[in-house]
Amino acid sequence: MGARMNEPLWGVFLVTVIPAFLVSVFATGWIARHASKLGLLDRPNARKVHTTPIPLGGGIGIWLGVVVVFAVGSLTTWMLVSNSDWAKTFLPESVSIYLPGLLSRIGSIWLLIAGGTVLMMLGLLDDRFGLDWKLRLAVEIGVAIAIVYGQHLQLTAYIDAPWLTSILSVLWIVMLINSFNMLDNMDALSGGVASIICAMLSVMLLSTPESSMGQPQLFVAAMMLTLLGGLLGFLKHNWPPAKIFMGDAGSYFVGYWIAIGTLLSTYPDARGATPHAVLAPLCLLAIPLYDMVSVIWIRLREGRSPFQADKKHFSHRLVEMGMTKTQAVATIYLATLTCSLGALILPRTDMIGAGIVVSIVLAMLSLIAVLESLTRGTDR
Protein backbone atom coordinates (compact mmCIF):
# COMPACT_ATOMS: atom_id res chain seq x y z
CA MET A 1 0.00 0.00 0.00
CA GLY A 2 2.95 2.34 0.64
CA ALA A 3 3.83 2.47 -3.06
CA ARG A 4 0.25 3.27 -4.03
CA MET A 5 0.11 6.03 -1.44
CA ASN A 6 3.28 7.68 -2.79
CA GLU A 7 2.37 7.66 -6.50
CA PRO A 8 -0.09 10.62 -6.46
CA LEU A 9 2.06 12.86 -4.27
CA TRP A 10 4.13 14.41 -7.05
CA GLY A 11 0.90 14.95 -8.97
CA VAL A 12 -0.55 16.89 -6.04
CA PHE A 13 2.49 19.17 -6.09
CA LEU A 14 2.30 19.73 -9.85
CA VAL A 15 -1.39 20.67 -9.90
CA THR A 16 -1.24 22.96 -6.86
CA VAL A 17 2.07 24.75 -6.30
CA ILE A 18 3.08 25.43 -9.91
CA PRO A 19 -0.22 26.84 -11.27
CA ALA A 20 -0.84 28.86 -8.09
CA PHE A 21 2.68 30.29 -8.42
CA LEU A 22 2.12 31.28 -12.05
CA VAL A 23 -1.23 32.94 -11.37
CA SER A 24 0.13 34.76 -8.33
CA VAL A 25 3.37 35.96 -9.91
CA PHE A 26 1.59 37.50 -12.92
CA ALA A 27 -1.34 38.92 -10.93
CA THR A 28 0.94 40.44 -8.29
CA GLY A 29 3.14 41.97 -10.97
CA TRP A 30 0.12 43.56 -12.66
CA ILE A 31 -1.15 44.97 -9.37
CA ALA A 32 2.29 46.39 -8.54
CA ARG A 33 2.34 48.26 -11.86
CA HIS A 34 -1.16 49.69 -11.40
CA ALA A 35 -1.23 50.17 -7.61
CA SER A 36 -1.01 53.96 -7.83
CA LYS A 37 -4.11 54.16 -10.05
CA LEU A 38 -5.93 51.79 -7.71
CA GLY A 39 -5.03 53.90 -4.67
CA LEU A 40 -3.09 51.02 -3.14
CA LEU A 41 0.09 52.65 -1.84
CA ASP A 42 1.68 52.19 1.57
CA ARG A 43 3.22 55.54 2.44
CA PRO A 44 6.08 55.73 4.97
CA ASN A 45 5.51 57.05 8.47
CA ALA A 46 7.11 56.89 11.93
CA ARG A 47 6.05 53.29 12.59
CA LYS A 48 7.15 51.81 9.25
CA VAL A 49 10.60 50.75 8.11
CA HIS A 50 10.35 51.71 4.42
CA THR A 51 11.16 55.26 3.30
CA THR A 52 9.35 55.48 -0.06
CA PRO A 53 5.74 54.65 -1.06
CA ILE A 54 5.36 50.93 -1.84
CA PRO A 55 2.41 49.35 -3.69
CA LEU A 56 -0.08 47.32 -1.67
CA GLY A 57 -2.39 44.58 -2.92
CA GLY A 58 -0.02 41.63 -3.18
CA GLY A 59 -2.58 39.70 -1.17
CA ILE A 60 -4.90 39.79 -4.18
CA GLY A 61 -2.31 37.81 -6.13
CA ILE A 62 -2.02 35.23 -3.34
CA TRP A 63 -5.80 34.93 -3.14
CA LEU A 64 -6.15 34.62 -6.92
CA GLY A 65 -3.54 31.86 -6.98
CA VAL A 66 -5.65 29.81 -4.58
CA VAL A 67 -9.03 30.61 -6.13
CA VAL A 68 -8.03 29.96 -9.75
CA VAL A 69 -6.40 26.62 -8.93
CA PHE A 70 -9.43 25.41 -6.98
CA ALA A 71 -11.81 26.69 -9.66
CA VAL A 72 -9.97 24.75 -12.37
CA GLY A 73 -9.58 21.77 -10.06
CA SER A 74 -13.27 21.73 -9.15
CA LEU A 75 -14.35 21.86 -12.79
CA THR A 76 -11.84 19.20 -13.82
CA THR A 77 -12.84 16.88 -10.97
CA TRP A 78 -16.53 17.22 -11.84
CA MET A 79 -15.85 16.46 -15.52
CA LEU A 80 -13.69 13.42 -14.76
CA VAL A 81 -16.17 11.96 -12.28
CA SER A 82 -19.02 12.57 -14.70
CA ASN A 83 -17.15 10.74 -17.47
CA SER A 84 -15.33 7.72 -16.10
CA ASP A 85 -13.78 7.00 -19.52
CA TRP A 86 -11.88 10.30 -19.38
CA ALA A 87 -10.58 9.43 -15.92
CA LYS A 88 -9.36 6.04 -17.15
CA THR A 89 -7.74 7.64 -20.20
CA PHE A 90 -5.94 10.57 -18.56
CA LEU A 91 -5.25 9.40 -15.01
CA PRO A 92 -3.64 6.33 -13.43
CA GLU A 93 -5.88 4.32 -11.13
CA SER A 94 -3.79 5.39 -8.12
CA VAL A 95 -4.99 8.97 -8.74
CA SER A 96 -8.52 8.39 -10.05
CA ILE A 97 -9.56 6.53 -6.89
CA TYR A 98 -9.41 9.86 -5.04
CA LEU A 99 -11.75 11.73 -7.42
CA PRO A 100 -15.11 10.81 -5.80
CA GLY A 101 -13.81 11.86 -2.40
CA LEU A 102 -12.54 15.16 -3.79
CA LEU A 103 -15.86 15.80 -5.54
CA SER A 104 -17.73 15.28 -2.28
CA ARG A 105 -15.68 18.04 -0.65
CA ILE A 106 -15.91 20.67 -3.37
CA GLY A 107 -18.90 22.35 -1.71
CA SER A 108 -16.99 22.62 1.55
CA ILE A 109 -13.89 24.08 -0.07
CA TRP A 110 -15.90 26.82 -1.76
CA LEU A 111 -17.54 27.77 1.51
CA LEU A 112 -14.05 28.03 3.00
CA ILE A 113 -12.89 30.10 0.03
CA ALA A 114 -15.93 32.36 0.47
CA GLY A 115 -14.91 33.04 4.08
CA GLY A 116 -11.36 33.81 2.98
CA THR A 117 -12.66 36.08 0.22
CA VAL A 118 -14.66 38.14 2.71
CA LEU A 119 -11.52 38.59 4.81
CA MET A 120 -9.42 39.43 1.77
CA MET A 121 -11.93 42.12 0.78
CA LEU A 122 -12.00 43.42 4.37
CA GLY A 123 -8.21 43.73 4.30
CA LEU A 124 -8.30 45.36 0.86
CA LEU A 125 -10.75 48.00 2.10
CA ASP A 126 -8.51 48.61 5.08
CA ASP A 127 -5.49 48.94 2.78
CA ARG A 128 -7.38 51.41 0.59
CA PHE A 129 -9.36 53.49 3.08
CA GLY A 130 -8.31 52.50 6.61
CA LEU A 131 -10.94 50.87 8.81
CA ASP A 132 -11.53 51.04 12.55
CA TRP A 133 -10.02 48.04 14.38
CA LYS A 134 -13.36 47.31 16.05
CA LEU A 135 -15.06 46.83 12.67
CA ARG A 136 -12.22 44.64 11.41
CA LEU A 137 -12.26 42.48 14.52
CA ALA A 138 -16.06 42.14 14.36
CA VAL A 139 -15.93 40.91 10.76
CA GLU A 140 -13.09 38.49 11.57
CA ILE A 141 -15.09 37.01 14.45
CA GLY A 142 -18.23 36.84 12.32
CA VAL A 143 -16.48 34.95 9.53
CA ALA A 144 -14.80 32.60 12.01
CA ILE A 145 -18.15 31.83 13.69
CA ALA A 146 -19.84 31.21 10.34
CA ILE A 147 -17.12 28.84 9.18
CA VAL A 148 -16.69 26.96 12.47
CA TYR A 149 -20.41 26.36 13.01
CA GLY A 150 -21.31 26.09 9.33
CA GLN A 151 -18.60 23.52 8.60
CA HIS A 152 -18.65 21.90 12.06
CA LEU A 153 -14.95 22.53 12.59
CA GLN A 154 -13.65 21.43 15.95
CA LEU A 155 -10.23 22.05 17.43
CA THR A 156 -8.73 18.65 18.30
CA ALA A 157 -7.99 19.04 21.99
CA TYR A 158 -9.55 15.89 23.52
CA ILE A 159 -12.06 18.03 25.37
CA ASP A 160 -15.48 16.40 25.65
CA ALA A 161 -17.32 19.70 25.33
CA PRO A 162 -18.19 20.65 21.72
CA TRP A 163 -19.35 24.11 22.76
CA LEU A 164 -15.91 24.83 24.22
CA THR A 165 -13.92 23.43 21.30
CA SER A 166 -16.08 25.48 18.92
CA ILE A 167 -15.27 28.67 20.84
CA LEU A 168 -11.58 27.72 20.87
CA SER A 169 -11.74 27.12 17.11
CA VAL A 170 -13.16 30.61 16.55
CA LEU A 171 -10.45 32.12 18.76
CA TRP A 172 -7.78 30.13 16.92
CA ILE A 173 -8.87 31.51 13.53
CA VAL A 174 -9.05 35.11 14.76
CA MET A 175 -5.71 34.75 16.54
CA LEU A 176 -3.89 33.49 13.43
CA ILE A 177 -5.45 36.16 11.21
CA ASN A 178 -4.02 38.82 13.49
CA SER A 179 -0.70 37.07 14.12
CA PHE A 180 0.16 37.04 10.40
CA ASN A 181 -1.10 40.59 10.09
CA MET A 182 1.27 41.66 12.88
CA LEU A 183 4.12 39.64 11.36
CA ASP A 184 3.80 41.51 8.07
CA ASN A 185 6.25 44.29 8.93
CA MET A 186 9.39 43.63 6.84
CA ASP A 187 10.10 42.58 3.27
CA ALA A 188 9.47 38.86 2.69
CA LEU A 189 8.85 38.21 6.40
CA SER A 190 5.20 37.18 6.71
CA GLY A 191 5.12 35.56 3.27
CA GLY A 192 8.33 33.64 3.91
CA VAL A 193 7.29 32.40 7.34
CA ALA A 194 3.89 31.36 5.98
CA SER A 195 5.61 29.50 3.12
CA ILE A 196 7.76 27.51 5.56
CA ILE A 197 4.71 26.63 7.64
CA CYS A 198 2.67 25.58 4.59
CA ALA A 199 5.50 23.42 3.26
CA MET A 200 6.15 21.70 6.58
CA LEU A 201 2.45 21.15 7.32
CA SER A 202 2.02 19.66 3.83
CA VAL A 203 4.89 17.24 4.41
CA MET A 204 3.33 16.25 7.69
CA LEU A 205 -0.11 15.69 6.15
CA LEU A 206 1.17 13.68 3.22
CA SER A 207 3.18 11.41 5.51
CA THR A 208 0.56 11.05 8.28
CA PRO A 209 -2.42 8.93 7.14
CA GLU A 210 -5.92 10.12 7.93
CA SER A 211 -7.11 8.05 10.91
CA SER A 212 -10.41 7.00 9.31
CA MET A 213 -9.01 5.85 5.92
CA GLY A 214 -5.30 5.26 6.38
CA GLN A 215 -4.58 7.39 3.28
CA PRO A 216 -2.53 10.59 2.86
CA GLN A 217 -4.44 13.75 3.74
CA LEU A 218 -4.55 14.97 0.15
CA PHE A 219 -7.41 17.44 0.55
CA VAL A 220 -5.86 19.60 3.28
CA ALA A 221 -2.38 19.15 1.81
CA ALA A 222 -3.70 20.51 -1.49
CA MET A 223 -5.06 23.53 0.39
CA MET A 224 -1.66 24.23 1.94
CA LEU A 225 0.33 23.55 -1.23
CA THR A 226 -1.89 25.86 -3.26
CA LEU A 227 -1.34 28.63 -0.73
CA LEU A 228 2.39 27.85 -0.86
CA GLY A 229 2.36 28.41 -4.61
CA GLY A 230 0.49 31.69 -4.20
CA LEU A 231 2.95 32.85 -1.56
CA LEU A 232 5.99 31.96 -3.66
CA GLY A 233 4.56 33.93 -6.59
CA PHE A 234 4.04 36.91 -4.30
CA LEU A 235 7.54 36.58 -2.80
CA LYS A 236 8.99 36.90 -6.30
CA HIS A 237 7.92 40.57 -6.05
CA ASN A 238 8.20 41.00 -2.27
CA TRP A 239 11.82 39.83 -1.93
CA PRO A 240 14.06 42.68 -0.71
CA PRO A 241 13.92 45.32 -1.95
CA ALA A 242 10.17 44.75 -2.11
CA LYS A 243 8.24 46.00 -5.13
CA ILE A 244 4.90 45.34 -3.42
CA PHE A 245 3.49 44.42 0.02
CA MET A 246 0.79 41.83 0.66
CA GLY A 247 -1.13 44.31 2.84
CA ASP A 248 -3.96 43.39 5.14
CA ALA A 249 -5.73 41.73 2.20
CA GLY A 250 -2.94 39.17 2.09
CA SER A 251 -2.17 38.73 5.78
CA TYR A 252 -5.85 38.23 6.67
CA PHE A 253 -6.31 35.61 3.96
CA VAL A 254 -3.04 33.81 4.70
CA GLY A 255 -3.69 33.65 8.46
CA TYR A 256 -7.25 32.43 7.88
CA TRP A 257 -6.24 29.75 5.35
CA ILE A 258 -3.51 28.34 7.57
CA ALA A 259 -5.87 28.36 10.57
CA ILE A 260 -8.48 26.41 8.59
CA GLY A 261 -5.83 23.96 7.39
CA THR A 262 -4.69 23.23 10.94
CA LEU A 263 -8.29 22.71 12.08
CA LEU A 264 -9.06 20.30 9.23
CA SER A 265 -5.90 18.25 9.67
CA THR A 266 -5.67 14.88 11.39
CA TYR A 267 -2.59 14.59 13.59
CA PRO A 268 -2.68 11.20 15.41
CA ASP A 269 -1.96 8.16 13.26
CA ALA A 270 -4.57 5.64 12.18
CA ARG A 271 -4.15 3.66 15.42
CA GLY A 272 -4.59 6.72 17.60
CA ALA A 273 -1.22 5.94 19.18
CA THR A 274 0.09 9.50 18.98
CA PRO A 275 -2.49 11.80 20.60
CA HIS A 276 0.32 14.24 21.47
CA ALA A 277 0.63 15.03 17.73
CA VAL A 278 -2.20 17.55 18.18
CA LEU A 279 0.50 19.88 19.52
CA ALA A 280 1.95 20.10 16.00
CA PRO A 281 0.13 23.36 15.07
CA LEU A 282 1.57 25.08 18.14
CA CYS A 283 5.07 24.03 17.07
CA LEU A 284 4.51 25.08 13.47
CA LEU A 285 3.12 28.46 14.51
CA ALA A 286 5.31 29.08 17.55
CA ILE A 287 7.16 32.06 16.03
CA PRO A 288 4.11 33.98 14.69
CA LEU A 289 2.36 33.39 18.02
CA TYR A 290 5.45 34.50 19.96
CA ASP A 291 5.58 37.70 17.92
CA MET A 292 1.90 38.44 18.52
CA VAL A 293 1.91 37.67 22.25
CA SER A 294 5.15 39.58 22.92
CA VAL A 295 3.98 42.65 20.99
CA ILE A 296 0.63 42.72 22.79
CA TRP A 297 2.43 42.33 26.14
CA ILE A 298 4.77 45.23 25.37
CA ARG A 299 1.89 47.48 24.32
CA LEU A 300 -0.18 46.68 27.39
CA ARG A 301 2.85 47.12 29.66
CA GLU A 302 3.37 50.56 28.18
CA GLY A 303 -0.28 51.45 28.74
CA ARG A 304 -1.21 51.43 25.05
CA SER A 305 -3.92 49.67 23.08
CA PRO A 306 -2.91 46.21 21.84
CA PHE A 307 -4.23 47.28 18.42
CA GLN A 308 -2.00 50.36 18.18
CA ALA A 309 0.59 49.76 15.46
CA ASP A 310 4.24 50.35 16.32
CA LYS A 311 7.81 49.13 15.71
CA LYS A 312 7.95 46.74 18.67
CA HIS A 313 7.65 43.50 16.71
CA PHE A 314 10.08 40.60 16.99
CA SER A 315 11.76 41.60 13.72
CA HIS A 316 12.13 45.22 14.85
CA ARG A 317 13.61 44.09 18.15
CA LEU A 318 16.17 41.94 16.32
CA VAL A 319 17.21 45.01 14.30
CA GLU A 320 17.55 46.96 17.56
CA MET A 321 19.94 44.19 18.72
CA GLY A 322 22.24 45.12 15.83
CA MET A 323 21.03 42.89 13.00
CA THR A 324 20.31 44.13 9.51
CA LYS A 325 16.75 43.68 8.24
CA THR A 326 17.91 40.78 6.07
CA GLN A 327 19.59 39.09 9.03
CA ALA A 328 16.48 39.60 11.17
CA VAL A 329 14.24 37.99 8.56
CA ALA A 330 16.69 35.10 8.08
CA THR A 331 16.81 34.55 11.85
CA ILE A 332 13.02 34.35 12.03
CA TYR A 333 13.01 31.94 9.07
CA LEU A 334 15.48 29.65 10.85
CA ALA A 335 13.55 29.79 14.11
CA THR A 336 10.32 28.94 12.26
CA LEU A 337 11.98 26.06 10.43
CA THR A 338 13.46 24.66 13.66
CA CYS A 339 10.11 24.70 15.45
CA SER A 340 8.40 23.22 12.38
CA LEU A 341 10.85 20.32 12.25
CA GLY A 342 9.74 19.52 15.78
CA ALA A 343 6.16 19.32 14.51
CA LEU A 344 7.19 16.69 11.95
CA ILE A 345 8.59 14.51 14.71
CA LEU A 346 5.46 14.51 16.89
CA PRO A 347 3.43 11.93 14.89
CA ARG A 348 6.49 9.65 14.80
CA THR A 349 7.45 9.52 18.45
CA ASP A 350 6.10 8.44 21.82
CA MET A 351 4.99 10.62 24.71
CA ILE A 352 8.54 11.06 26.03
CA GLY A 353 9.78 12.12 22.61
CA ALA A 354 6.87 14.54 22.31
CA GLY A 355 7.83 16.06 25.65
CA ILE A 356 11.37 16.56 24.37
CA VAL A 357 10.11 18.21 21.16
CA VAL A 358 7.86 20.61 23.03
CA SER A 359 10.69 21.37 25.47
CA ILE A 360 13.00 22.21 22.56
CA VAL A 361 10.44 24.64 21.11
CA LEU A 362 9.88 26.27 24.51
CA ALA A 363 13.64 26.45 25.07
CA MET A 364 14.11 28.23 21.75
CA LEU A 365 11.42 30.79 22.57
CA SER A 366 12.92 31.27 26.03
CA LEU A 367 16.39 31.73 24.54
CA ILE A 368 15.04 34.41 22.21
CA ALA A 369 13.34 36.17 25.13
CA VAL A 370 16.52 36.03 27.27
CA LEU A 371 18.70 37.43 24.47
CA GLU A 372 16.21 40.24 23.94
CA SER A 373 16.14 41.06 27.64
CA LEU A 374 19.95 41.12 27.83
CA THR A 375 20.09 43.55 24.95
CA ARG A 376 17.51 45.81 26.54
CA GLY A 377 19.52 45.69 29.75
CA THR A 378 22.70 46.71 27.88
CA ASP A 379 20.86 49.62 26.22
CA ARG A 380 19.89 50.96 29.61
Image (cartoon, rainbow, N blue to C red):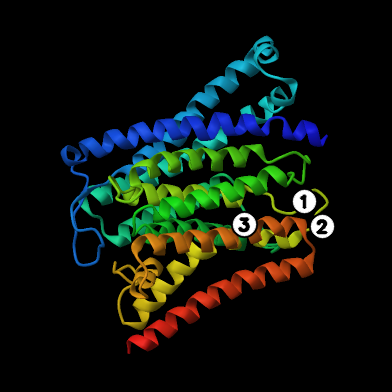
Tell which of 205 and 49 is nearer to you: 49
On the question of residue 175 being in view, the answer is no
Task: Report the residue marked by disc 3.
Answer: 155
Q: Mark 2 points at which residue?
A: 273
Q: In which quarter of the image is residue 103?
A: top right
Q: Which of marks 2 and 3 is nearer the N terminus?
A: 3
Image position of 311 (left or right of 335): left
Q: Which residue is pictured at 54% across the width and 26% down the height?
A: 73
Tell which tag, 1 or 3, sits nearer the viewer.
Answer: 1
Query: Type of residue at label 2?
Result: Ala
- Amino acid type at circle 3 is Leu
Above or below, 341 against 351 in this view is above
Amino acid beneath label 1: Asp
Q: How crowded is mark 1: few (under 14 residues within 10 Å), some or many (20 or more)?
A: some
Task: Indicate the secondary structure of the residue bearing disc 2.
Answer: loop
Q: Where is residue 329 in the image (x, y as percent from the top left)?
A: 41, 60
Q: Where does the image place residue 130, in percent across and percent down from the top left?
A: 23, 54
Look at the numbered discs 1 and 3 and tell me whether their residues touch, using CB distance below 8 Å.
Answer: no
Disc 1 target residue: 269
Looking at the image, residue 277 lies above or below residue 202: below
Q: Distance between the residues labelled 1 and 2?
A: 6 Å
